Amino acid sequence: MPAAKAVRGVAVFFIVSRSKVCASRTLTRHRYCDMNHCSTTGGYEATRSLLVLKHPPTAIFCQNDRTALGCYDALREAGLVVPGDVSVVGYDDEEISRHLRPKLTTCVLPHRAMGRWTIDHLQEYESKPRDRQHYPITKIECSLVPRESEGPPST
């Protein structure tokens, strides 16, 4: 499957697509850039751009739950069903994720763990001159909250 065209931007949508050429599922990064990239409108527009690909996705991982709301709207407008035609997963477990239909599968943003890490490391970085401060990439576990918006792709 040809890779999705990458566009500079912050919002990243991971899509899973089944290519007619390749029977296995392929994970592709599709970047979408818009002033409203973290918004419902950004999710709607990004999803519309995904649906016109030669091999549209069977799953979309949205940057946050607000973009997933826009994703739902674009999929519904295109006559597609979540999760029957396209699975959708959000990120940050906002309250809206529990009220969407179907309820949105999402990941919990670990606010407490992020705050704790910051406090624990703040003093370490304050002692260094500003031009020598380097902030390492730190991975903090984000739990999956399975709900109703993901499943195997229809054949």
Image (cartoon, helix red, strand yellow):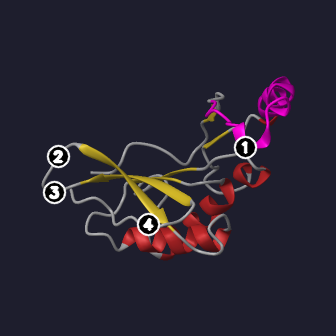
How packed mark 2 is, by other alpha carbons closer than 10 Å (few <14, some 14-19, many 20 or more), is few
Numbered circle sitting on residue 20: 3
Q: Give the residue pinned by disc 4.
A: 80
Distance from disc 4 to disc 2, alpha carbons, whole Å, reads: 22 Å
Q: Give the residue pinned by disc 1.
A: 131
Please determine whether, in this image, residue 63 is positioned above or below residue 133.
below
Residue lying at 42% horizontally and 60% vertically, measured from the top left: 30
Distance from disc 1 to disc 3, alpha carbons, whole Å, reads: 51 Å
Q: For numbered disc 4, what is the local secondary structure?
A: loop
Quarter holding residue 124: top right
Distance from disc 2 to disc 1, alpha carbons, whole Å, reads: 50 Å
Q: State the extent of the magenta-drawn residues as a range.
A: 112-138
**Residue 107, visible in the rendered structure:** yes
Q: Earlier in the sequence, mark 1 or mark 3?
A: 3
Please determine whether, in this image, residue 72 is positioned above or below residue 98.
below
Q: Amino acid at mark 2?
A: Ala
Numbered circle sitting on residue 117: none
Q: Give the residue pinned by disc 2.
A: 23
Q: Earlier in the sequence, mark 2 or mark 1?
A: 2
